[in-house]
Image (tube, rainbow, N blue to C red):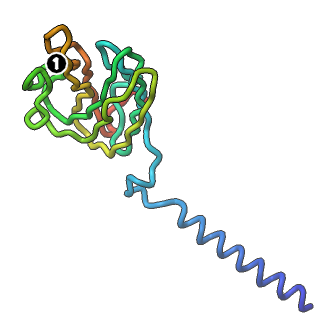
Amino acid sequence: MQFERVFFHFGAVFFLLGIVFAGCSRGSGNLKSDASPSEVQVTLREWSVAVDRGTVRPGRITFQTANRGTEDHELVILRTDLPADALSLRDDRVDEATAGRILGEIEPFAPATEKELTLDLEPGSYVLLCNIVETENGQKEGHYTMGMRIAFKVESSRSRPSE
């Protein structure tokens, strides 16, 4: 009889704990940090930026970035309403102070390596770009001006992002 009573109490405790933990694990859906990030594959090479999808939903986005070129490249995430090829320049690089708002950056990294960056992004228009400027044979070469840029959109779920 004593054994049945103890067994019954343990069973009731575990049942209640199960209900509590199940309720806690659902989350409210309002916290972006609870959601798994969406991933965007980014490939950098001379002289292009390519993505596996150009539109995602708002929230945490992880940019899995591979440098498949032969030179160091960087990835700058810029929020702007300007077209990707019309950003203001200063000294052969995008003027980050006037072109839009920088939300994140992967500093220059070597060829044949990969880096990632996770950001909380709101609906809007963005440009992904490399803003490195080099001097080669006495001439400045801006990676952005040579084509290392791409438009990117974050759209609400009412739109149809390509996922």
Q: Position of residue 4 (x, y in %)?
A: 88, 85
Q: Is residue 60 left or right of residue 134?
A: right
Q: Identify the image quadrant of residue 91.
A: top left
Q: Determine whether the residue tagged by mark 1 lies in a helix, strand or loop.
A: loop
- The quadrant where residue 63 appears: top left
- Residue at 34%, 43% (x, y): give it: 119
Relative to 86, residue 138 above or below: above
Measuring from the top left, give residue 54's x and y in whole percent.
33, 25
Residue furthest right as drawn: 1
Instruction: Look at mark 1 in the image and give the residue it sits on.
Output: 85
Q: Which residue corresponds to the image point at 14% horizontal and 31% vertical from the top-left? A: 81
Q: Residue at x 20, y 36 (%)?
A: 79
Q: Position of residue 153 (x, y in %)?
A: 28, 31
Image side of residue 155 versus residue 136, left or right: right
- In the picture, the quarter occupied by the N terminus is bottom right
Would you place residue 19 above or below residue 60 in this image?
below
Binning the other alpha carbons within 10 Å of mark 1 as few (below 14), some (14 to 19) or many (20 upward) gives some
Give 136 or 32, whichever is nearer the viewer: 136
Residue farthest toward the top in the current orientation of the protein: 137
Residue 32 versus residue 160 in the image, above or below: below
Q: Is 94 left or right of 54, judged from the image as shown?
A: left
Residue drawn where x is 84% and y is 81% of the image = 7
Extreme residue toward the bottom, this view: 2
Q: Nearer the viewer, residue 37 or 135?
A: 135
Where does residue 23 sit, x and y in percent of width and height? 55, 66
Instruction: Give the position of the C terminus as an image quadrant.
Output: top left
**How many numbered discs?**
1
Q: What type is the residue that disc 1 sits on? A: Asp
